[in-house]
Amino acid sequence: MDHVDVMLDQWRRERPDLDLAAVGTIGRLGRFALLAGRVIEEVFKQHGLQRGEFDVLATLRRSGAPYELMPSELAALLLMSRAGMTSRIDRLESAGLVERSTDPADRRSVRIALTAAGRALVDAAFTDHAANETALLSGLSGEERATLDGLLRKLLADVEGAENPAP
């Protein structure tokens, strides 16, 4: 029995009329995300980063050379407002991890690029992050991870499709 089983037993006692199978699944997903999130945050903290700052640096890094994007592209990729992105970029720029430059194709636009320090930091943080996430899933076999990954991909496609229905 885990924490979610205890909660489900309590609800079954109080509300035997409800089908709680999905509540258990979503409860476990949420609980895992909460507990894993704490462990993941600790890795970022060891590198002097908050999760949101890591996300910006990692998005720039995985975009490929020259490791630069427009602020609006970063905001869209990270599912956040442009105002929120501006404050993250300001903090990262102050720390010397990114730099702003005028877009040569449109002088009204700005590009955000990783600095050499930003690239070194995100590479080190991502190396530790990947090892940390591997450790978090070490209780599952490779086959179990692949099955879980496929099922979660299917669920995300359904949820993301519901959020963004085709016109």
Image: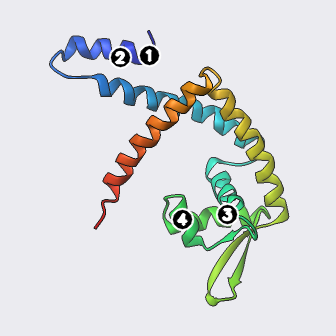
Q: In this view, does 5 lie above or below 95?
A: above
Residue at image x 72%, y 80%?
101
Percent across and percent down for residue 145 are: 56, 29
Q: Name the residue under label 4.
A: 75
* Nearer-N-terminus badge (2/4): 2
Q: Which mark is on residue 25? A: none
Q: Mark 1 touching mark 2, by CB under 8 A? A: yes
In the image, what residue occupies the spot 38% across and 14% down?
A: 5
Label 3 neighbour load within 10 Å: few <14, some 14-19, many 20+: few
Circle nearer the viewer, 3 or 4: 3
Q: In this image, 131 relative to 14: left or right?
A: right
| The quadrant where residue 136 appears | top right
**Residue at the image position 84 percent from the left and 60 percent from the top:** 117
| Gap between marks 3 and 4 measured at Cα | 14 Å
Secondary element at tag 3: loop
- The local secondary structure at tag 2 comes to helix
Tag 3–tag 4 contact (CB < 8 Å): no
Q: Looking at the image, is mark 3 or mark 1 earlier in the sequence?
A: 1
Which amino acid does the dot numbered 3 rest on?
Answer: Ser
- How far apart are the two marked residues, 2 and 4, measured between alpha carbons? 37 Å
Please name the residue that numbered disc 2 is placed on.
Answer: 7
Q: Say which label, 3 or 4, has the lower sequence index.
A: 3
Q: Name the residue under label 1.
A: 3
Q: Mark 3 points at which residue?
A: 63
